[in-house]
Amino acid sequence: MNETEFDQSPAADRRYGVSIVANDKVIDWLLPFLESYSVTNSSLPLYLIPYDDNMSLTKRAAELYGATIVESEPVEIDRLSYQLYPGIFNANRRRLRKLQALVLPLDEVAYVDVDVILFRDLRPVFGRLERGKVEFIVASPSFDYVYNENRKRHAFLDDALLFNDGFWVTSSRFLTLSDVLATIDSDVEMFHDIRKRGQLFAQPLMNFVVHRRGLKTALLPHCVDNASHENFYKAPGITFRDGKPLDPDGKEIYLAHWAGALSLPSHDIFAGAWKELSKAAWSKFQKRTT
């Protein structure tokens, strides 16, 4: 099928799905995510990318919730991670394995961090991509954790939307793993010159590739009616209606993200929902595994 035929095909014929990265170390995050997914998005296929080989509990959870474990080895991604981040951050380099989302058998893919719970059906997010208009969708901006001051040297970043890479949607029509590798191969020195340091790995890379390739990037509310760009777990002014959160303007929040959290949810506005999902998920998991 050529590109024109693809663009004209009915949305119902396209394959949409969601991907996450996990292992047993984050099982306390994974199970609530999976429970939230089953409640809100069970009609969408879910792909679980292994963070490493520590997968015993994770595989059981995936089977319980019908997620597909991605079996292909991320050889090129791991090679890239060693190239970009040599030294002592061995485990953190594997955060780049989220790039495997770009090689899944899907026409459009949503990547979601595992320290997230979903509140709404993601299907309205799909089918919004359009060449030259919307080629990469993100949930929220991130102004402080992408680039350093050297970004001011590069005109292509003047109006760039800096984004949190804990949620994004794209298509192989617009971004492939080969594109990522080619971009870094050409501009690796520029990347290292402008990337923000401080335990940041995938987020500066995803932003750099998207910006350097000139992808048309849009926030979720620019693509979905009444959607909010808010998802930070410390967000102020959040209210709930029928168990689903709204931002201070009454816009619908699609997910809660504990980005940068050092412990499991306890007292924030989304913690109650997270705890309920966690309790339900652990009950199912323990019954299944005993």
Image (tube, rainbow, N blue to C red):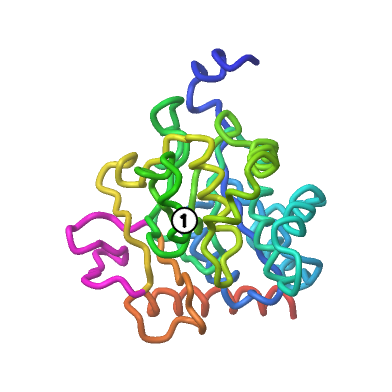
Depth check, front residue: 140 or 237: 140
Circle 1 Cα neighbour tier, 10 Å, few/some/many (<14 / 14–19 / ≥20): few
**x 48%, y 78%: residue:** 261
Whether the magenta-drawn stretch holds residue 238 is answered as yes
What residue does disc 1 label? 150
Query: Would you say 184 lies left or right of 242 here?
Result: right
**x 82%, y 50%: residue:** 75
Q: Is residue 104 visible?
A: no
Instruction: Please identify the quadrant where the C terminus is shown.
Output: bottom right
Where's residue 65, x and y in %?
63, 60
Where's residue 257, x and y in %?
44, 67
Which residues make up the magenta segment? Answer: 234-254
**x 50%, y 59%: residue:** 166
Query: Would you say 185 lies left or right of 17 here?
Result: right
In this rendering, the answer to whether 130 lies above or below 32 is: above
Instruction: Please identify the quadrant where the N terminus is shown.
Output: top right
Depth check, front residue: 212 or 223: 212
